[in-house]
Amino acid sequence: MGSTTSRKSRRVPIAAGFILTAAAMAQVAAPAAGRGGAQTAAAQSSGPPPAYPLRPVADSAMVARGKALYDVNCGLCHGEDARGGDGGTNLIRGTVLLNDQNGELLGPVLDNGRLAEGMPKFNFTNAQILDIAAFLHSFRVGGYDVSRNRPATIVVGNAKAGEAYFKSKCANCHSATGDLSGFASRFSDERALQQRWLMPAAGGRGGPPAPVVTVTVALPSGEKFEGRLGRIDDFVVTLTEPDGTPRSFRREGNAPKVDIHDPLKPHKDLLSVYTDKDIHDITAYLVTLK
């Protein structure tokens, strides 16, 4: 970690609490030698840096060394991606790193630590600080998470496999030349198409309203009532008859007898059966029905 003659130039690692106060920012305004240099000083004199500064691509060896140092000393608190961990803050969104160019703002924080916030002091040299800065700056600030970026298309399945699945599971109720003829042409976005066939109870554009769930209530006397299901639980069942008359029945044991008619029950039953591949394949097939 360096000889004793270089202890004055050593720095300490990252742990917790990375948001600088205005006073702290003023104290570190002048960049340390070897951290940022004249380029950073010139940038500061011309005004504040942009919210998401564009920095030169760091040397891959520096990033690798910085990652090794970070993982051992900082990862537990701040997470392996520096976006928060076991009590540590999100470093990537902190003002220090947002304004830092090449360790000139990061270094003083590492030098002094944040003892009140649980951040200890570690012995890092200037070179090690630069490596850690290179690693932390290797993360993209805006749109960093690929999983949150909207893909260009969700049609990534096998249409032939989707057709086979459709014929085995769906053809008893639906037909590509019947009710689903031109199905894909009803949507301008494949995501809406997928949502429609996967969760048709949502209704919405791309087809008729979701089917109505009805219920038949048979009383012990033999009298029956049927209508749109309103509510059902262990104590009561309510319905609205075709003429608009509301009905409510108390449930006790097995009386009255209640039969629910849900046209979407086959769809709901399949939700627990589909794999991701099934969903991708069926969508890939349905987009061909134009």
Image (cartoon, grey):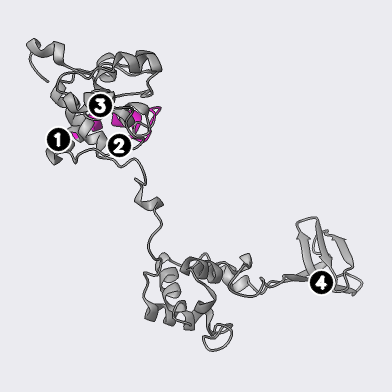
Magenta-colored span: 68-89
Q: CA distance from mark 2 to mark 3?
A: 26 Å
Is residue 32 located in the magenta-colored stretch of the structure? no
Q: Earlier in the sequence, mark 1 or mark 4?
A: 1
| Residue linked to disc 1 | 62
Task: Give the vertical position of 177 relative to 115 (above or below).
Answer: below
Q: Earlier in the sequence, mark 1 or mark 2?
A: 2
- Give the SS element for disc 4: strand
Residue 157 pos. (x, y %): 37, 72
| Residue linked to disc 2 | 53
- Give the SS element for disc 3: helix
Q: Quadrant of residue 242?
A: bottom right
| Residue linked to disc 3 | 73
Q: Residues within 10 Å of mark 4 (few under 14, many from 20)?
A: many
Tag 2 near tag 4, CB within 8 Å: no
Q: Earlier in the sequence, mark 1 or mark 3?
A: 1
Residue 210 appears left or right of 89 = right
Residue 227, numbered label: 4
The disc labelled 4 sits on which kind of residue? Answer: Gly
Task: Give the vertical position of 204 relative to 74 (above or below).
Answer: below
Q: Nearer the viewer, residue 228 or 287?
A: 287
> In the image, what residue occupies the spot 38% across and 23% down?
17
Q: CA distance from mark 3 to mark 4?
A: 66 Å
